Image (cartoon, rainbow, N blue to C red):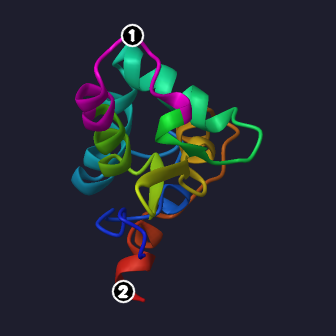
Amino acid sequence: MPDESAHISAPASTCCPPITTAALSEEAAEIMARMFKALSDPVRLRLLSRVASHPAGEACVCDIADVGVSQPTVSHHLKKLREAGLLTSERRATWVYYRLAPGALAALGAFLTETGLARVEEKVFTAQSA
C-alpha cells in the first residue's frame, strides 16, 4: 500500500535556514512551528523516541503503543507526528509501521544552530514543484 504521509508539504531537510542566519518567511515559520508543536507533547516525544531508537529503523505501532495512554490516543499522536513531517508510515496488512521522515531531525537541529546547513529559502518547496 502507498505511504500514508504523502500530504506533507515539504521535506524537512529543505525547510529552513538556521534561525540566526535569516528571518523566516511565513511558510517556513509554519513548517517549523508545526514540527516543534508536535514535539511539545511528552507522549509524542516518547513515541518519536521509540520509533527513532527502534533497532529495525522502523517500528510497528504494536511495538511502541505502551506509553500510558489508550490506543486511539496513540494513533492520534502518531497522526500529528506524521502531519508535522516528523514520521512517515506504511500500512502492512493490519499493522502500521512508522519511521523517521528523512532529514526531519537534521532540519530541526540545523534550524537551531548557527553552524547548521544554510538552506536558501527558494528550496523550501522543491519537492512540490518536482
Q: Nearer the viewer, residue 91 or 113?
A: 91
Circles 2 and 1, Cβ within 8 Å, touching? The answer is no
Q: Secondary structure at mark 2?
A: helix
Residue depicted at x 25% and y 56%: 27
Magenta stretch: give its range.
63-76
Q: Nearer the viewer, residue 58 or 87?
A: 58
Q: Secondary structure at mark 1?
A: loop
- Locate residue 18 relative to residue 27 in the image: left or right: right
Three-letter residue code for mark 2: Ser
| Residue 42 position in % (x across, y down) | 40, 14
Instruction: Kindly identify which residue carries mark 2.
Output: 129
Dot 2 alpha-carbon crowd within 10 angstroms: few under 14, some 14 to 19, many 20 or more: few
Q: Give the foreground label among 2 and 1.
A: 1
Residue reaching furthest top? 68
Q: Nearer the viewer, residue 71 or 118?
A: 71
| Residue 97 position in % (x across, y down) | 51, 52
Q: Earlier in the sequence, mark 2 or mark 1?
A: 1
Residue depicted at x 51% and y 49%: 98
| Residue 83 position in % (x across, y down) | 30, 50
Residue depicted at x 35% and y 64%: 4
Q: How many marks?
A: 2
Whether residue 122 is visible to the viewer of this picture, yes or no, is yes
- Locate residue 82 relative to residue 20 in the image: left or right: left
Q: Quadrant of the N terminus?
A: bottom left
- Position of 66 relative to 92 (above/below): above
Q: Quadrant of the C terminus?
A: bottom left
Three-letter residue code for mark 1: Gly
- The picture quadrant where one finds residue 114 is top right
On residue 68, the disc is: 1
Label 2 and label 1: CA atoms lie apart by 41 Å
